[in-house]
């Protein structure tokens, strides 16, 4: 799979549970309809600590800074594992928005 470096960087940091590397200071994560805004909120985003995420496919979502990723997510939650769509938007080599559907 040809993965842009910013997305590969995200998944590597996610595997290390490294919120400071994952997303910019003012970043936003939208997961299960809940908005987590800013690095402190993202650090305490409870779902993040209980899952393993592996990208299955990726494609550009309009420009060089937006990507759509389909990922297999497993962990301690009902219906695990599931395949979810994630939309990444990057700015200055960090993710500034991640929306999980």
Image: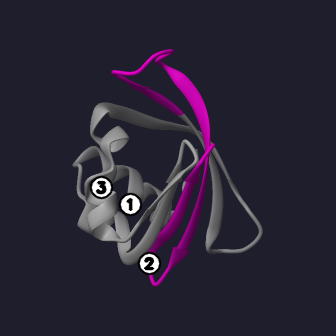
In the rendered image, which residue does mark 3 sit on?
Answer: 13
Estimate the spatial distance between the alpha carbons at disc 2 and disc 1, rounded to whole Å: 9 Å
**If the image is split into quadrants, where does the N terminus sit?**
top right
Residue 80: x and y in percent read 46, 18
Q: Nearer the viewer, residue 56 or 99?
A: 99
Q: Residue furthest right?
A: 62
Q: Earlier in the sequence, mark 2 or mark 3?
A: 3
Residue 83 in the magenta stretch? The answer is yes
Image check: 65 left or right of 51? right
Estimate the spatial distance between the alpha carbons at disc 1 and disc 3, rounded to whole Å: 6 Å
Q: Earlier in the sequence, mark 2 or mark 1?
A: 1
Q: Are marks 2 and 1 in contact (CB under 8 Å)?
A: yes
Q: What's the magenta region?
A: 72-101
Q: In percent of the image, x 45 and y 36: which residue is there?
A: 54
In the rendered image, which residue does mark 1 sit on?
Answer: 9
Q: Main secondary structure of the magenta part?
A: strand
In the rendered image, which residue does mark 2 sit on?
Answer: 93
Residue 22: x and y in percent read 34, 63
Callout 2: 10 Å neighbours few (<14), some, many (20+)?
A: few
Q: Residue furthest bottom?
A: 92
Image check: 24 left or right of 57? left
Checking the image for residue 86, the label placed there is none
Residue 88 in the magenta stretch? The answer is yes
SS of the residue at dot 2?
loop
Callout 1: 10 Å neighbours few (<14), some, many (20+)?
A: some
């Amino acid at each position: 799979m040809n993965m842009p470096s910013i997305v590969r960087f995200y998944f590597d940091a996610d595997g290390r549970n490294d919120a400071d590397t994952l997303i910019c200071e003012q970043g936003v994560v939208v997961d299960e309809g809940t908005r987590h805004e800013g690095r402190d909120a993202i650090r305490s985003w409870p779902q993040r600590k209980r899952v393993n995420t592996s990208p299955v496919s990726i494609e550009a979502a309009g420009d060089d800074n937006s990507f759509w990723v389909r990922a297999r997510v497993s962990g301690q939650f009902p219906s695990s594992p599931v395949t979810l769509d994630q939309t990444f938007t990057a700015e200055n080599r960090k993710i500034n928005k991640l929306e999980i559907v």
